[in-house]
């Protein structure tokens, strides 16, 4: 689960390492007397009990591979900038959640794990779907330890159940934005002081498209057609129709005034919102993850189909730095984190007995746990989506055996994007892409929040994109995409 306003990034958690204990590779090198420390960077705010979490983890790591982790956190606002500096300056670190995975892998910043991962992380490697491998290959090589979690994503309109009950609103028939107009208008009329559709800066409307360079740049393939051509989604009728709905909602006050520049967000656990756009995947078990995060009931209705994409395959990629003196050891550590239930559950749920306890029961063959109020506070554990293998997590009492079956069935049934595994080499058109980024930064928030008329504004935007070199990028992108398809058919 993640909010649609946080583009992933790709984005996300970073583990970076400044190696404190050097260990030579030559036969004459002395072995360290104590455990090797792998210093790691993580994104966001550190759990208040980080020392406790690491102490429990390091007991296992020291016993199994004579290593320990030292995790340091970088805030969301600083993460991309600081990690760019760490990588570009060649700082010596061991492990990290990737930042700009394809670009930095292509530059040689990350270690080639094509052979190292199956050799030194065999337990975890065997569990990884081929889609994770395909989605992370750069020029035929693997540079990532992908987190096995939501291999597919689906966009949802998520509603605050308290308001649904209060106003007796039924949202069960909603399949598109347009379908939601009636209930949006009904709620806004009854409670105009609450954000009806709670969106803000960074929001991009959800359509049936997969983006080559992320949804802030207008290069995408339609997931409802044959996927053979890369297009500007803003020029397509189906996406323009979605934007027209947003424009109508903005004029009616359903989308709050000033949404294009609002960057404070709407906390899930608050009552300041009626509906949000959320991203869900199979390991969210329907609304279960959202309910835990919100600490209140929500109801979500899908507005896109489940889709396996490159961006999902790269959602939480861990990497080993090429500057690391402990590449093999780092991969071994990833293997333990992603295959040892004691280690991973201790990080994701926090300390046993304080944050959770076993119920003595199993759900679909997996141990069941009961979460406590300490877990609900949210700052005494790590996030599942960017920590490790979700398949070995214990299941809280809110997850049923039927939901586990639905999870596995939905993964098997999910549609695969035609872009899966295609990573565009931007080297020959980097200046044009920079110019295009500047144009999009000027228009994207206003258009997607309904602040401006999409028809007239898109015409202006297209003219500026053309001047910025859009056609040059599209031509090169289509050329590479055609070659990619020919090589993979």
Image (cartoon, rainbow, N blue to C red):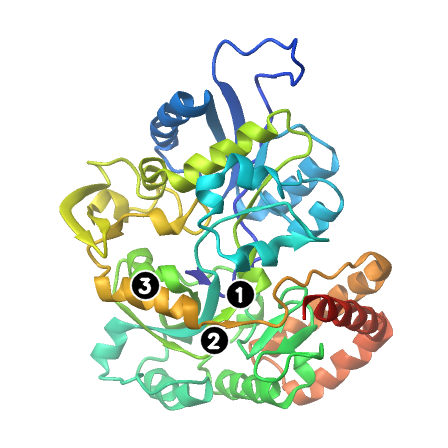
Mark 3 touches mark 1? (CB < 8 Å): no
**Closer to the camera in the image, 436 or 219:** 219
Q: Residue at x 46, y 77 (%)?
A: 305
Residue 328 sits above or below residue 168 on the image: above
Residue 181: x and y, percent? Answer: 42, 88
Question: Among all residues in the image, which is located at the extreme left?
Answer: 360
Say what secondary structure mark 1 lies in.
loop
Alpha carbon separation for disc pair 2 and 1? 9 Å
Q: Residues within 10 Å of mark 3 (few under 14, many from 20)?
A: many
- Quadrant housing residue 228: bottom right
Mark 3 touches mark 2? (CB < 8 Å): no
Alpha carbon separation for disc pair 3 and 1? 30 Å
Mark 2 touches mark 1? (CB < 8 Å): yes
> Of the numbered discs in the image, which one, if any, rests on residue 262?
1
The quadrant of the rendering that contains the N terminus is bottom left
Disc 2: which residue: 256
- Quadrant housing residue 90: top right
Q: Earlier in the sequence, mark 3 or mark 1?
A: 1
Residue 2: x and y, percent? Answer: 44, 60
Alpha carbon separation for disc pair 3 and 2? 30 Å
Q: Nearer the viewer, mark 3 or mark 2?
A: 3
Q: Residues within 10 Å of mark 1 (few under 14, many from 20)?
A: some
Residue 440: x and y, percent? Answer: 71, 70
Disc 3: which residue: 285
Say what secondary structure mark 3 lies in.
loop
Inspect this view and state whether residue 10 appears.
no
Q: Residue at x 23, y 57 (%)?
A: 364
């Amino acid at each position: 689960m993640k909010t649609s306003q946080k583009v992933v990034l790709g984005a996300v958690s970073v583990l970076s390492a400044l190696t404190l204990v050097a260990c030579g590779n030559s036969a004459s090198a002395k072995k360290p007397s104590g455990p090797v420390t792998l210093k790691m960077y993580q994104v966001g705010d550190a759990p208040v009990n980080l020392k406790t979490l690491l102490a429990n983890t390091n007991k296992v790591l020291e016993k199994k591979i004579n290593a320990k982790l030292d995790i340091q956190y970088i805030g969301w606002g600083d993460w991309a900038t600081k990690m760019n500096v760490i990588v570009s300056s060649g700082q010596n670190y061991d492990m990290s959640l990737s930042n700009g995975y394809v670009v930095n892998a292509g530059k040689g910043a990350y270690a080639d794990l094509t052979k190292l991962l199956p050799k030194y992380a065999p337990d975890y490697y065997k569990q990884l779907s081929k889609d994770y491998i395909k989605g992370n290959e750069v020029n035929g090589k693997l540079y990532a330890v992908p987190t096995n979690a939501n291999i597919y994503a689906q966009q949802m309109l998520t509603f605050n159940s308290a308001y649904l009950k209060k106003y007796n609103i039924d949202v069960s028939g909603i399949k598109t934005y347009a379908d939601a107009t009636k209930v949006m208008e009904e709620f806004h009329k009854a409670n105009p002081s609450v954000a009806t559709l709670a969106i803000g800066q960074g929001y991009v409307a959800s359509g049936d498209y997969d983006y080559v360079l992320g949804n802030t740049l207008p290069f995408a393939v339609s997931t409802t057609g044959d996927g053979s051509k890369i297009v500007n989604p803003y020029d397509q009728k189906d996406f323009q129709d979605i934007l027209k709905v947003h424009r109508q909602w903005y004029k009616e006050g359903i989308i709050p005034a000033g949404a294009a520049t609002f960057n404070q967000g709407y906390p899930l656990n608050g009552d300041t919102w009626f509906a949000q756009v959320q991203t869900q995947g199979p390991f969210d078990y329907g609304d279960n993850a959202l309910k835990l995060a919100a600490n209140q009931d929500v109801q979500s209705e899908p507005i896109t189909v489940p889709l396996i994409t490159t961006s999902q395959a790269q959602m939480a990629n861990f990497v080993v730095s090429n500057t690391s003196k402990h590449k093999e050891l780092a991969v071994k550590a990833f293997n333990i984190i992603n295959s040892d239930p004691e280690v991973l559950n201790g990080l994701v749920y926090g300390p046993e007995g304080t944050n959770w306890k076993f119920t003595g029961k199993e759900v679909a063959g997996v141990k069941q746990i009961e979460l406590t109020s300490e877990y609900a506070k949210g700052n005494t554990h790590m996030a599942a989506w960017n920590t490790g293998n979700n398949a070995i997590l214990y299941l809280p009492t809110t997850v049923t055996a039927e939901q586990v079956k639905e999870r596995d069935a939905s993964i098997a049934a999910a549609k695969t994007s035609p872009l899966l595994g295609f990573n565009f080499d931007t080297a020959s058109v980097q200046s044009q892409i920079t110019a295009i980024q500047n144009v999009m930064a000027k228009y994207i928030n206003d258009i997607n929040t309904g602040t401006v008329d999409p028809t007239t504004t898109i015409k202006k935007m297209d003219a500026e994109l053309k001047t910025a070199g859009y056609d040059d990028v599209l031509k090169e992108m289509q050329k590479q995409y055609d070659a990619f398809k020919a090589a993979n058919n």
